[in-house]
Image: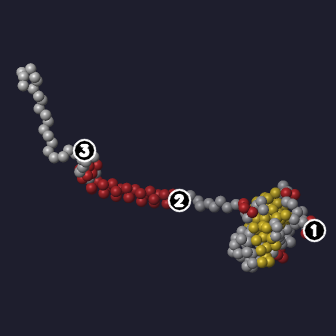
């Protein structure tokens, strides 16, 4: 070594054992947990959380008591149009989906009156279909068949389809009341079951 050479700097001491990378460093979980909560604090918070959740559920159920339970059923009395809107000899299905009725206007030779048939099978309450080609109502559930006027003639249905009350309003429209129904065919020619036009 010459006097002009600088003195070498001392090197750091060599680590004992293998060097651990950052991923290999294990963290003592109990120390990390104790940094956030102690066990007593955690249990206290959990108890308060359960209490508040139960209180919120009780308040929501009490609030539900004050909200009325409303059903949005279609009205039972409604207008379906003027008599000239219905063709003679045709079963009109426009109101089947909304009000569950068919409006039928008889052909002139049959009286040309208008009546409304309630679209519910008298067997178990299914909604029949109108089959124009076969000129009958047919229940898809158990095969009951009904003629154009609603009289049952095949299948397990014990009686004819029901007719609804019909009347003419002041504005000239037909008013149908599905709450007033006529089950007996003897009542079908009454003025409130058969609207003569």
Residue marked by disc 2:
64
The image shows residue 177, relative to residue 6, as above or below, that is below
Secondary structure of the residue carrying numbered label 3: loop
Residue at 82% across, 64% down = 91
In the rendered image, which quarter contains the C terminus?
bottom right
* Mark 1 or 3, nearer chain start: 3
Secondary structure of the residue carrying numbered label 2: helix
Q: Are marks 1 and 3 in contact (CB under 8 Å)?
A: no
- Between circles 2 and 3, the one closer to the viewer is 3
For disc 3, the neighbor class at 10 Å (few under 14, some 14 to 19, many from 20) is few
Q: CA distance from mark 2 to mark 3?
A: 59 Å
For disc 1, the neighbor class at 10 Å (few under 14, some 14 to 19, many from 20) is few
In the rendered image, which quarter contains the N terminus?
top left
- Between circles 1 and 2, the one closer to the viewer is 1
Residue at 33% across, 54% down = 45
* Mark 1 or 2, nearer chain start: 2
Q: CA distance from mark 1 to mark 2?
A: 59 Å
* Residue 176 drawn at (x, y percent): 78, 63
Q: Quadrant of residue 142?
A: bottom right
Q: Is residue 96 visible?
A: yes
Residue marked by disc 3:
21
9 on left or right of 147 = left
Query: What residue occupies the far front of the structure in this picture?
Result: 1
């Amino acid at each position: 070594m010459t006097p002009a050479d600088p003195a070498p700097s001392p090197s750091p001491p060599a680590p004992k054992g293998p060097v651990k990378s950052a991923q290999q460093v294990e963290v003592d979980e109990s120390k990390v947990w104790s940094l956030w909560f102690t066990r007593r604090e955690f249990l206290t918070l959990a108890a308060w959380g359960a209490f508040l959740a139960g209180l919120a559920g009780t308040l929501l159920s009490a609030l539900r008591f004050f909200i009325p339970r409303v059903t949005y059923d279609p009205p039972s009395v409604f207008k379906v149009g003027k008599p000239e809107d219905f063709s003679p000899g045709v079963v009109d299905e426009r109101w089947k989906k909304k009000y569950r009725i068919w409006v039928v206007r008889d052909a002139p030779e049959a009286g040309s009156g208008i009546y409304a048939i309630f679209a519910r099978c008298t067997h178990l309450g299914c909604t029949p279909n109108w089959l124009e080609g076969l000129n009958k109502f047919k229940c898809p559930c158990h095969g009951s068949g009904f003629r154009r006027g609603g009289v049952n003639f095949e299948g397990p249905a014990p009686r004819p389809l029901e007719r609804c009350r019909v009347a003419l309003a002041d504005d000239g429209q037909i008013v149908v009341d599905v709450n007033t129904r006529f089950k007996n065919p003897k009542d079908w020619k009454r003025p409130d079951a058969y609207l003569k036009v």
